[in-house]
Image (cartoon, rainbow, N blue to C red):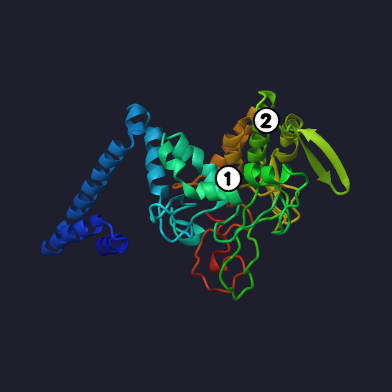
Amino acid sequence: MAHYIVNRLKHRNLKIGFFLECAFLAIEAIPNYTRPKVFYAIISSVYSACLRRIRKLIPSIEASGSNSWFAEQLTLTSVQLVGKVGDTGIPVLPHTKDSVVSIAAGLPHFSHGFMRCWGRDTFIALPGLLIQTGRLDVARWCRSVKLLYEHQPTLLHEPVHRLFNTDDSPVSPQNPFTYPFAQKAVFLAFIDLALNTSPKGNKGIPATPRDGSAIELVAMGYQAVSWMAELVECGIGTISEVIIETGSTQKTVTYREWSEMIRENFEKKFWCAGGYYGDTGGYYRDTGGYYRDTVGSESGGDEKLRPNQTFAMVIAPELFHHPNMTLALKTVGTKLVGLVGMSTLSPDDGDYEPYYDTGNHGTDYRTAHGFNYHQVS
């Protein structure tokens, strides 16, 4: 463990790595039975020193008060997930030639390289990690956010533009404003294709539905449209309506009408009382109630019990009927919450595969090359 820590930090050319290397040399000269205690003492001291330094550099932690444990933990989490990583593919700032700030989609698999910066993850995490924690100076320099906003790729390395399309084709502009609004404000894009060749042929096959309406994206769309409506009603917005096309039919609606349509239909479409039928074995699971992951998917994903509904609750709580929300949270707590986080799929589901391994070169279609990373604990 000591060698692993030192090599990892020295690889990033961090001074603390060289410090720990010297400190750990002392462990080799003491009896074996005392080494764990000394190792713990060294790591604990370094960790405490890091916390003191973070508290000094981020005044918002102290300003939140001694009783705000959650605020402190949220800020410390932002330190873990936000930082300068040089291999993301984000262009460097021309006047500094330095790596730029970006938000990791997750740890450890989505912490570096072209897999670090994802559109939906960035925009969902930004308010909690950098705005609520008072780290506005960091948010201002988070160039990954700026690039994602301007160009709206799903993944910075591999731009994709779509608005609930079933493929990865661009959205055709309906009028001079609809297209940039859809691309910048609603940002409804996400992709998770297996990137390696698989002996079972799952390369390029989405592990989760790419059609239908995803619950958290609908919530983000609702907030964006409602915000546009408020701008118009305050006299700030200059464009008050958009054209919606359904097949060969066109309809003009205001932003307020659009947001109300979402609000009026949200519970009707997403709420699932009772339980669900498994799409692989015909079984029925009584859950007490939950919100569907998608609506209108032809890939069998609508009835899946996933944690995405909780994201939508945070983004747009006004869309939810509170008694139903309470039942759904109880279901999530019972079925999805584990010791260190939430499962991405209910263990009751026939597609559930608990062990995720990108190095799996086996012949099981559902797990080869980590294909099941949306179906794990």
| Above/below status of 190 relative to 232 | below
Q: Residue furthest top?
A: 234
* Label 1 residue SS: loop
Instruction: Choose between 204 and 38: the one closer to the eye.
Output: 204
Instruction: Choose between 258 and 345: the one closer to the eye.
Output: 258
Q: Residue furthest front?
A: 95
Instruction: Choose between 112 and 245: the one closer to the eye.
Output: 245
Sequence-first tag of 1 and 2: 2
Q: Is residue 376 left or right of residue 268?
A: left
Q: Is residue 149 left or right of residue 211?
A: left
| Amino acid, disc 2 | Gly
- Specify the quadrant of the image occupied by residue 169: bottom right
Gap between marks 1 and 2 measured at Cα: 35 Å
Label ID, residue 352 = none
Residue 216 appears in the picture as rendered: no
Mark 2: few/some/many CA within 10 Å (<14, 14-19, 20+)? few
Residue 275 appears in the picture as rendered: yes
**Residue underneath mark 1:** 307
Label ID, residue 237 = 2
Q: Is residue 251 left or right of residue 1?
A: right
Q: Is residue 245 left or right of residue 5?
A: right
* Label 2 residue SS: loop
Q: Position of residue 112 (x, y in %)?
A: 44, 59
